[in-house]
Image (cartoon, grey):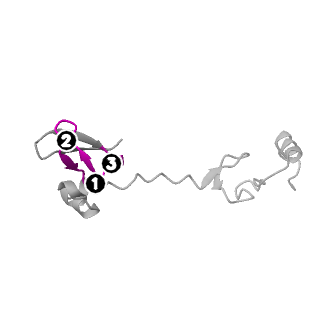
Amino acid sequence: MERMKVACQNGHRHTALRSVYGTTRPCLKCGANVEIPRGKMETGRTALTDCDILRILGKQTPLPPPPVAPHPPKTGPCPRCSARISKSANVCQHCQCYVGVMPDFLKRLCFARPNAFSSA
């Protein structure tokens, strides 16, 4: 709960709850009227703006740029001859093997008998 310190004209100090801000209450010790301001703005404090906070903090050094992740290789090995070929290639230019997306049954046939589909 937000509270404010106030004093009566005789110097008796009290703590006022937010619910009584902007009212006048009797002092609990001497009975004199105590005027409770509306909020902290009336107690002599001023609100800080964003510019004030930046001025207090001063100049800050900028953060370094984030590290650049290495690009994944754009080549890979041919499953048949292990030559480096482009990942976007469908046929190896060295052994003429099909390296694109292949159904499972065709993979088993090609790798079980490597020369079964070549024209020799």
Number of the front mark, 3 or 2:
2
Are the residues flagged by discs 3 and 1 in contact, CB closer than 8 Å? no
26 within the magenta span: yes
Q: Residue 39 occupies which quadrant of the picture?
A: bottom left
Residue at left 32%, top 54%? 64
In this picture, residue 57 sits left or right of residue 94: left
Local SS, label 3: helix
The reply to whether residue 57 is in sight is no
Q: Which residue is mark 3?
A: 20
Q: Is residue 117 above or below residue 55?
A: above
What percent of the width, then of the height, locates residue 35?
A: 22, 52
In this picture, residue 109 sits left or right of residue 8: right
Local SS, label 2: loop
Q: Earlier in the sequence, mark 3 or mark 1?
A: 3
* Magenta stretch, residue numbers: 17-38
- Nearest the eye: 66 or 120: 66
The reply to whether residue 52 is in sight is yes
Residue at left 87%, top 47%? 106
Tell which residue pokes out farthest to the top in this image: 29
In this picture, residue 87 sits left or right of residue 103: left
Please name the amino acid that badge 2 sits on: Gly
Q: Which residue is mark 1?
A: 39
3D distance between C-alphas at marks 2 and 1:
23 Å
Q: Which residue is mark 2?
A: 31
What percent of the width, then of the height, locates residue 116?
A: 89, 47
